Image (tube, rainbow, N blue to C red):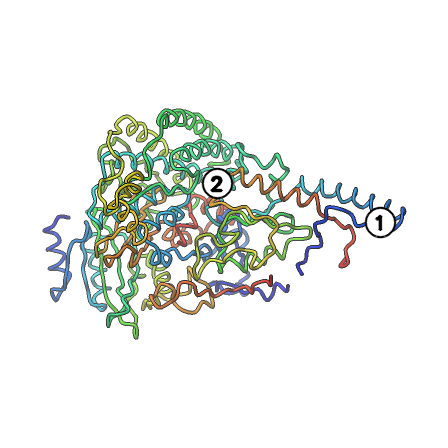
Amino acid sequence: MDARTFPITTAAPAARSTKDAAFEYLTTRKDELIGWARKFSLFPYPFVTACCAMEFMAVSASPYDTDRFGAALPRFSPRQADLLMVVGTVTHKQAPILLKVYEQMCEPKWVMAFGVCASSGGFYQNYAALQGIDKIIPVDVYVPGCPPRPETVIDGIMQLQDKIARSRHPVVTERF
Amino acid sequence: MDTATIANPIRSSLGTGADDGSVIVNIGPSHPATHGTVQIVAELDGEKVLRTDVHCGYLHRGFEKECEDHTWHNLIPYVDRLNYVSPLVNDFAYCDAVEQLMGIEITPRCRHLRTLLSEYSRVVDHLTCVAAALMEMGAMTAFLYLVMVRDYMYEHLAALTGARVTHSYGRIGGLARDLPEGWLVRLEEILVKYEEFVGRVHALVDRNRIFIDRLRGVGTITTAQALSLGCTGPVLRSTGAAIDLRKDAPYLAYAELDFDVPVGIQGDNYDRYYVRMREMDESVYMIRQLAQMLPAGPVNVDDRRCTFPEKTFVYGQIESLINHFKLVMDGPLVPAGEVYCAHEAPNGELGFYLVSTGGGTPYKVHVRSPSFVHMGAASRMLDGGQLADVVPTFGSINMIGGECDR
Amino acid sequence: MAANDLGTLHRELVPAAGPASVSHGTIVLVLAPGELATTARRLRDEFGFDVLLDVTAVDWPDDALRFEVVHHFYSTAHRVRVRLKTRVGAAEPVVDSLCALYGSAAYMERECHDMYGIVFRGNRDLRPILLYEGFVGHPLRKDYPKLREQPLVAYREG
């Protein structure tokens, strides 16, 4: 069971009485509001390693511009970031670093596997490369490509935004 | 999960430093200034860096082991991803090494096109290096200008090769395809844009007081130290030594071109920045010369040992079908022998040491990587400086992880 | 340095008429392991080979002396390259380090040790550089299977 507590639901569970229905209406509105705020203010942590970095630089710069999506400001401290973008190949030597950075991020957090090497190891199938980061951390969106075109990355960010908008955002969780 | 149980992949040589009052600080590997793949363990006395221990290898993807499992032809995409900022140079250096082993002479048009595209890749590499280095010092505007030009070049190269970044365009015996219609016209438009944007960057930073204070006299290295530490390329030329394989041992079409080799004066960060800016200008000059003198003719050598036959023949003639089949399944058969072939990559001398035992698959491929050797030299440039100097010094070395760690 | 200098190099450097040749523009000298350090010093001091370009090895598992350690040198003045090759066996894969002559030898010898297990006598720092602490084996040897991974982090379930 992974640490995140945002199951994807598209419909609220059936209300048992009108009082419950009103409560559900309020909580779904709250979820939509918080989801809207979170999806348009993503603070990426660019965990950049390899060739995909070139397309990461291109998608962050003027022609393609992630700033339009609110996802422009990178935060190089995991404590201040909520979107872990794993850009490029993660090797077995790098895997402990990735896990440590992921663990240091605070909830809510999402993970984007940018490129095929992060998604599944790419075409490096040998002793050195981790065959996909989802072997060690949970991933929310996979962006394939070697490297992916900036439009693919933007599509990935938009799909992640849809996912954030659809999910529940409990203010009080069972751990808090 | 308890973070104390996460394994540590390295062992630092610096100890704990607790006795003499100095502090051990870990920079990287997940750090924007170290390009995500280098760990610098630094011993600090206040802001002054006493010693550093540079660890690379976080992007070691087993390229040399992969080589022993694929055919000579199938390796071209892997070779692209070595220095992924200038992939065409890697392609052509590798193909040149295999062609030397096979005894193949490429066509004149191919030779000129490869030279043109190598210089184009050099411009892309230096644009990226300078843009990243400036951004790490806070000059975000310069980064946006240079990445804008680089994006025009990426789209232009995608029109030629099919991919923006990792082109896989070189082929053993030639190139994947010839130039499309209008490619050279668009090239000239992009070069004009390049001059405009780079002019703006020069205006912003060259005589900027803060820029000069941060880079002048920082990360200095002498020519003797650079040669002993194996530095080549802009790092060596910034010390004042005009050592460039394109002039010293001309390959491809460089002997027919008119160009200068820019050198620095002190071997510091400012010189490395300026050498790269001037090299880009020289590359643009070379590209314009080559666009004028491009000979007509075929791009691929007519040799069935390496060149794939035309598709119409593959579907029509049994000999071409078998030839195509053999080239795909067994790979081009390279006679037994070994070769060391080096090109002047944007980072320095990029060498391929190939060992063949006569099959379609290499016995050994070794890459002489300029970035890896520069990591060995990095400690010399970082020690004795300030902590804040680590960022521009490291950025000026242009360590590219794919090439450094292979 | 022209072909007659190859003769000079051969005469002066190789005491017992070991094989020397020119391979695609590079002068190749085959030496015994004991001669490596002295030959490298003479190359640097007398013949002007001021850059150590590369240190690597080739694994020939069927040969008695399994590892062929290869050094490449470049002379910026004469614009020519030299390749030194020497053979060591699997039981004692030790050659002399060139750290005292060239600063670039340090990292390159570490890589060769990582990949092949060649021990460079005189290089005091042979920690893993491309691999990581705890990696067992030398991947570029022909008997190391390509797919044998040694993960540092336990995989998740599912």
* Label 2 SS: helix
**Position of residue B121 measured from the top left corner of the image (x, y, whole percent):** 37, 38
Left or right of B364, for residue A56: right
Depth order, front residue of C94/C157:
C157
Vertical placement of B73 versus B176: above or below?
below
Q: Which class describes the residues within 10 Å of circle 2: few (<14), some (14-19), or many (20+)?
A: many
**Position of residue C157 measured from the top left corner of the image (x, y, whole percent):** 60, 63
* Label 1 SS: loop
Name which residue type carries label 1. Answer: Ala
Depth order, front residue of B263/B338:
B338
Label 2 and label 1 in one chain: no
Which label number is shown at residue A15? Answer: 1
Observer able to see residue B341: yes
**The residue marked by circle 2 belongs to what chain?**
B
* Front disc: 2 or 1: 1
Observer able to see residue B386: no
Name which residue type carries label 2. Answer: Ala
Vertical placement of A118 versus A149: above or below?
below
**Position of residue B2 measured from the top left corner of the image (x, y, whole percent):** 63, 65
Depth order, front residue of C96/B70:
B70
Residue at screen point 32% across, 55% down: B366
Q: Residue furthest bottom?
A: C91
The residue carrying mark 2 is B132
Which label number is shown at residue B133? Answer: none
Alpha-carbon span between mark 2 and mark 1: 55 Å
Q: Quadrant of the C terminus of chain B?
A: bottom left
Q: Quadrant of the N terminus of chain B?
A: bottom right
Marks 2/1 in contact by CB < 8 Å: the verdict is: no
**Position of residue C152 measured from the top left corner of the image (x, y, whole percent):** 52, 64
**The residue marked by circle 1 belongs to what chain?**
A
